[in-house]
Image (spheres, rainbow, N blue to C red):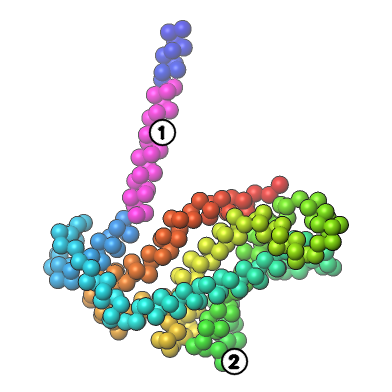
């Protein structure tokens, strides 16, 4: 019995040591990940003179100021950039959800000749380089005289092959008996989609919406390419405008204040819906 108790004690001690080591590694990793955000916020509340007088950067400030945040809205029209980005994000996400929901339903439930071949060709679009797609979209939008317009910004972003695939897999997880029973009752495909599939697959759809919002908010290459009118600048364009024509390259604290303002909506969105994002991704990756 003594040997058994000693072995059990050693086992508990080993498990406790392993648990402590795991948590220490996780805390260390969290500090490494969060440090850039801390440094961004810290720099944004430092006075310009204080920041320039630091020959060795300090990890704290004794005289925080919010002047940089006020300057972020006065040096350039940051409020307009935020409004443009909000409109772009909301409209693009709404249109994309309609498009991908109908496409995913067609591939998941409708039967038509060559469906598997069409879907395979559709998935193959994911292998095209992004640069090639950008060039093609630029030529199309330019020829349609849609540069420096919201339709020109929005149209190339209303389809995603990956999101169609993710939603199709979720639709196929719903038992076929529900679809057959709905058809027996005379329910149309559209009613079945809206009243059965959409409520059941809501977690995945919420995840797609959140990921698309983040993607639109962080969009940089396409807005920079298709717009040169400040009236249509998004926050991604605004950062460059702030750097070049706003505070200047040397006013780093004011730049960091603008970055904090632009990043805050996404951080709050992720913190609120992080559980739904994880559950939706896990649901999309599990079938059967």
Residue 29 percent location from the top left of the image: 37, 48
Q: Disc number at residue 236? A: none
Q: Is residue 17 left or right of residue 133?
A: left
* Mark 1 and mark 2 residues within 8 Å of each other at the beta carbon: no
Judge by depth and name the residue closer to the eye, 164 or 76.
76
Residue 256 picture location, percent across and down: 29, 69
Please name the residue shown 58% across and 78% down the image.
Answer: 156
Residue 248 seen from this side: yes
User: Where does residue 142 sit, x and y in percent of width and height?
Assistant: 56, 90
Question: Is 15 a magenta residue?
Answer: yes
Callout 1 environment at 10 Å: few (<14), some (14 to 19), or many (20+)?
few
Location of mark 1 (residue): 19
Disc 2 target residue = 143
Whether residue 240 can be seen here: no
View extreme (right): residue: 184
Local secondary structure at mark 2: helix
User: Callout 2: 10 Å neighbours few (<14), some, many (20+)?
Assistant: few
Q: Nearer the viewer, residue 74 or 35?
A: 74
Magenta: main secondary structure equals helix
* Picture layout, residue 65 above or below residue 225: above
Q: Position of residue 79 (x, y in %)?
A: 37, 78
Toward the top, the furthest residue is 1
Q: Residue at x 43, y 28 (%)?
A: 15
Q: Please tell me in which quadrant of the rendered image residue 209 appears.
A: bottom right
- What kind of element bears circle 1? helix
Mark 1 and mark 2 lie on one chain; the one further toward the N terminus is: 1
The quadrant where residue 165 appears: bottom right
Residue at 14% x, 71% y: name it.
Answer: 49
Q: Nearer the viewer, residue 30 or 265?
A: 265
Q: Point out the stretch of residues depicted in magenta.
A: 11-34
């Amino acid at each position: 019995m003594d040997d058994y108790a000693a072995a059990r004690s050693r086992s508990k001690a080993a498990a406790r040591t392993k648990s402590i080591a795991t948590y220490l590694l996780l805390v260390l990793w969290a500090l490494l990940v969060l440090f850039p955000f801390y440094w961004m916020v810290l720099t944004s509340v430092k006075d310009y003179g204080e920041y320039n007088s630091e020959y060795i950067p300090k990890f704290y400030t004794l005289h925080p100021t919010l002047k940089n945040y006020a300057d972020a809205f006065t040096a350039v029209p940051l409020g307009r950039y935020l409004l443009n980005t909000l409109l772009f994000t909301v409209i693009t996400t709404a249109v994309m959800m309609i498009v991908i929901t109908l496409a995913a339903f067609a591939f998941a439930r409708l039967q038509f000749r060559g469906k598997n071949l069409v879907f395979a060709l559709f998935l193959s679009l994911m292998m095209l380089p992004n640069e090639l797609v950008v060039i093609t979209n630029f030529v199309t939008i330019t020829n349609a005289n849609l540069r420096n317009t919201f339709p020109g910004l929005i149209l190339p972003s209303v389809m995603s092959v990956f999101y169609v695939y993710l939603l199709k897999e979720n639709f196929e997880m719903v038992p076929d008996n529900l679809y057959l029973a709905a058809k027996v009752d005379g329910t149309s495909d559209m009613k079945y989609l809206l009243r059965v599939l959409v409520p059941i697959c809501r977690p995945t759809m919420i995840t797609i919406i959140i990921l698309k919002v983040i993607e639109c908010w962080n969009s940089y290459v396409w807005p920079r390419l298709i717009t040169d009118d400040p009236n249509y600048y998004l926050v991604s364009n605004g950062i460059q405008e702030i750097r070049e024509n706003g505070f200047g390259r040397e006013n780093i604290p004011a730049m960091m204040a603008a970055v904090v303002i632009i990043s805050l909506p996404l951080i709050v969105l992720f913190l609120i819906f992080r559980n739904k994002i994880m559950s939706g991704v896990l649901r999309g990756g599990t079938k059967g």
